[in-house]
Image (cartoon, grey):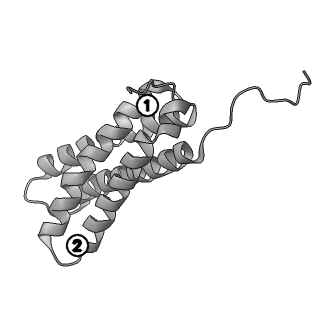
């Protein structure tokens, strides 16, 4: 075997796509958290303490999908759980955005569409096989 041969199987495109979409979600959550912290620190919220606490909480929540991305890219079995949990959390968030109406409606549709697509990619047999998760027949 030559030193240039790679013995690890190629990561399926579906797994890579799920990781990319999950990363985008994690980054969007982090940006929202930073925005909330900024409003709390420099804006005029009703409660500065609440705004800062909420922003920090959202920032901490962004760690869930971002850690999952690392696991998905390295094909770790454990990574699918937090990635799927992120999608399950995103669905009611998207629905609430749609129900709010106005300019939030297209954003809510996008959030829900990404969550559904990512969840589909995460449970696809190619992804399951790449992560070493046994399928129940």
Q: Quadrant of residue 8?
A: top right
Percent position of residue 52, x then y: 20, 47
Closest to the observer, 17 or 49: 17
Residue 74 in sight in this render: yes
Tally of numbered tags: 2
Q: 26 or 44, which lies in front?
A: 26
Marker disc for residue 105:
2
Compared to 106, does 56 lie above or below? above
Secondary structure found at label 1:
helix
Q: Nearer the viewer, residue 43 or 107?
A: 107
Q: Which residue is painted at 13% across and 46% down in the image?
A: 49
3 lies above or below 105? above
Answer whether residue 40 is visible to the viewer in this image.
no
- 11 horizontally vs 7: left or right: left
- Residue at the location (39% across, 27% down)? 137
**Residue 79 has which mark?**
1
Residue at image point 53% right, 42% down: 15
Q: Nearer the viewer, residue 31 or 42?
A: 31
Q: Residue at x 13, y 69 (%)?
A: 100
Judged from this view, the residue extending furthest toward the front is 137
Give percent across and percent down for residue 76: 51, 26
Disc 2 crowd, CA 10 A, few/some/many (<14, 14-19, 20+): some
Where 23 falls versus 97 (above or below)? above
Outermost top residue: 1
């Amino acid at each position: 075997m030559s030193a240039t041969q790679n013995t690890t199987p190629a990561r399926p495109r579906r797994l890579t796509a799920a990781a990319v979409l999950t990363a985008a979600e994690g980054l969007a959550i982090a940006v929202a958290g930073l925005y909330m912290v900024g409003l709390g620190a420099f804006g005029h919220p009703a409660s500065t303490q609440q705004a800062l606490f909420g922003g920090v909480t959202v920032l901490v929540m962004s760690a869930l999908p971002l850690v999952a991305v690392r696991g998905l890219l390295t094909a770790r079995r454990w990574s699918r759980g937090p990635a799927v949990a992120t999608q399950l959390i995103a669905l009611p968030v998207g629905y609430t955005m749609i129900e709010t109406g106005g300019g939030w409606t297209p954003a809510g549709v996008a959030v829900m569409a990404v969550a559904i697509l990512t969840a589909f990619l995460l449970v696809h047999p190619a992804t399951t096989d790449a992560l070493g998760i046994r399928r129940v027949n």
